[in-house]
Image (spheres, rainbow, N blue to C red):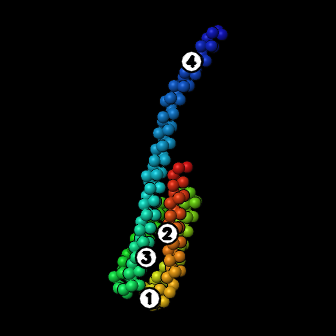
Amino acid sequence: MFAGRRAALPLALVLVSLSALALLPWWTMNRTGTLRNRVGIIAEPARAQVTRIQNAIALESAATRSFLLTGDSAAAAHHFTARGNRERALARLHLLTRALGPQVRASTDTLAGHLRAVEPLLDSLFSGLIERDAYLQRLPLQEDRLEEVLNAAADVDLPLGEEVTT
């Protein structure tokens, strides 16, 4: 009887080990599949939207400078096209960040706030409420705002990367 119990212990250990060998790969694949989906469905598309926003900001800035130099209405049209692209990318980014943590949502909201702060002066320039020369005197302030916006866009990407790895 005592010998039977001694034989049962190694047998039980073997059965537990074999069960673990069968269940561990399934658990690992399930976990990595979830992370892969989170990266592929949320994080990477969100990062793509951040890149689109940064590109649109660069195009808006270039179009504004072109308008300041030439007064050409085509430059204003390019600015508003780029702004529309940026606004669509920001809207998509907001949708994607709903599924992520509060830090990502907060940095996205900060970016949106910086973008809203820049628009009224630009609208005044393109609508003719502010002359180009008057806007040029405010250019250092606008340059600072542009830098804030670009930094805020870059700051969205940091928590996106952290969100994926946790």
- Marks 2 and 1 close (CB-CB < 8 Å): no
Q: Which mark sits nearer the N-terminus, 2 or 1?
A: 1
Q: Which mark identifies residue 150?
A: 2
* Viewer can see residue 48: yes
Q: Which residue is mark 3?
A: 61
Classify mark 1: helix, strand or loop. helix
Label 1 sits on residue: 132
Q: Quadrant of the N terminus?
A: top right
SS label for mark 4: helix
- What residue is shown at x 53% (from left), y 76% (from top)? 144
Residue drawn at x 45%, y 86% is: 125
Q: Residues within 10 Å of mark 4 (few under 14, many from 20)?
A: few
- Which type of secondary structure does the marked residue at label 2 adopt? helix
The amino acid at mark 2 is: Leu
Residue under numbered circle 4:
11
Between the residue at mark 3 and the residue at mark 1, the CA separation in whole angstroms equals 15 Å
Q: Is residue 17 above or below residue 145?
A: above
Tag nearer the camera, 4 or 3: 3
Label 3: element kind: helix
- The residue drawn where x is 62% and y is 13% is 6
Residue 153: % across, % down: 50, 66
State whether residue 21 is above or below residue 150.
above
Left or right placement of residue 104 versus residue 88 in this view: right
Mark found first going from the N terminus, 4 or 3: 4
Kind of residue at disc 4? Leu
Q: How many dots with numbers?
A: 4
